[in-house]
Image: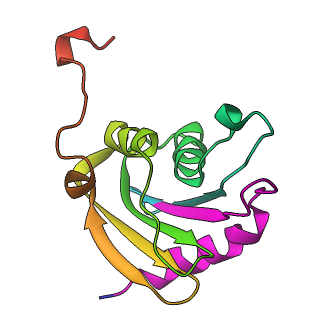
């Protein structure tokens, strides 16, 4: 199995847009929504490290701001020799805007690949009881 080529190519196109002058760890993410539309983003670092933002969260925000609230598939691409898994905060963002069976494709520009699901990455996720949601 391999990553969906359309999402991989979109992530590859977004990768050079990453702003990572401090870590030189460039990341891009492409997501597909339930309607089939795709959105991309890259990571953006800041000298004040906590203000940096991950590619995954940026792609989700891009999709949500365009009116989509259901991510159905994602490709996470790094320009490194080994794959990179989403951080905990990004996993929680995926949880908010996708189903537990969300397929996440972890890829490198050097050809490394692993498919996983949100359920595998975040088996005991946080969620508010439905009655507490506004």
Q: Nearer the viewer, residue 29 or 83?
A: 83
State the image coordinates of residue 56 (x, y, percent, origin top left): 52, 52
Residue drawn at x 68%, y 40% as measured from the top left: 52
Colour setting: rainbow
Q: Is residue 92 above or below residue 74?
A: above
Q: Residue at x 61, y 60 (%)?
A: 40
- Relative vertical location of residue 24 with respect to residue 10 in this rendering, above or below: above
Image quadrant where one finds the C terminus: top left
Residue located farthest toward the front when viewing the structure as drawn: 23
Give the number of callouts. 0
In this image, 49 relative to 75: left or right? right
Tell me residue 74's x, y (percent).
42, 63
Q: What quarter of the picture does the N terminus occupy?
A: bottom left
Question: Where residue 109 sits in the image (x, y, percent)?
Answer: 58, 83
Residue 97 at x, y percent in the picture: 37, 41
Quarter-of-image position of residue 39: bottom right
Is 128 contained in the magenta span? no
Q: Which residues are magenta?
A: 2-31
The image quadrant that residue 18 belongs to is bottom right
At horizontal 51% and vertical 46% (from top left) the residue drawn is 60
Q: From the viewer's perspective, tell me whether residue 101 is left or right of residue 6.
A: left
Q: Which residue occupies 59% across, 38% down?
A: 65
| Magenta span contains residue 6 | yes
Classify residue 33 as left or right of residue 54. Answer: left
């Amino acid at each position: 199995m391999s990553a969906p080529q359309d999402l991989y190519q979109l992530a590859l196109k977004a990768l050079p847009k990453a702003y990572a002058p401090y870590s030189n760890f460039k990341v891009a993410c492409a997501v597909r929504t339930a309607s089939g539309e795709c959105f991309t983003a890259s990571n953006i670092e800041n000298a004040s490290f906590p203000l940096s933002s991950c590619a995954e969260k940026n792609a989700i925000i891009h999709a949500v701001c365009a009116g989509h609230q259901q991510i159905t598939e994602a490709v996470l691409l790094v320009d490194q020799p080994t794959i990179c898994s989403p951080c905990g905060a990004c996993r929680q963002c995926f949880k908010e805007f996708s189903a537990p069976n969300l397929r996440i494709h972890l890829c490198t520009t050097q050809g490394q690949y692993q498919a996983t699901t949100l359920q595998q990455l975040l088996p005991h996720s946080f969620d508010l009881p439905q009655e507490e949601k506004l």
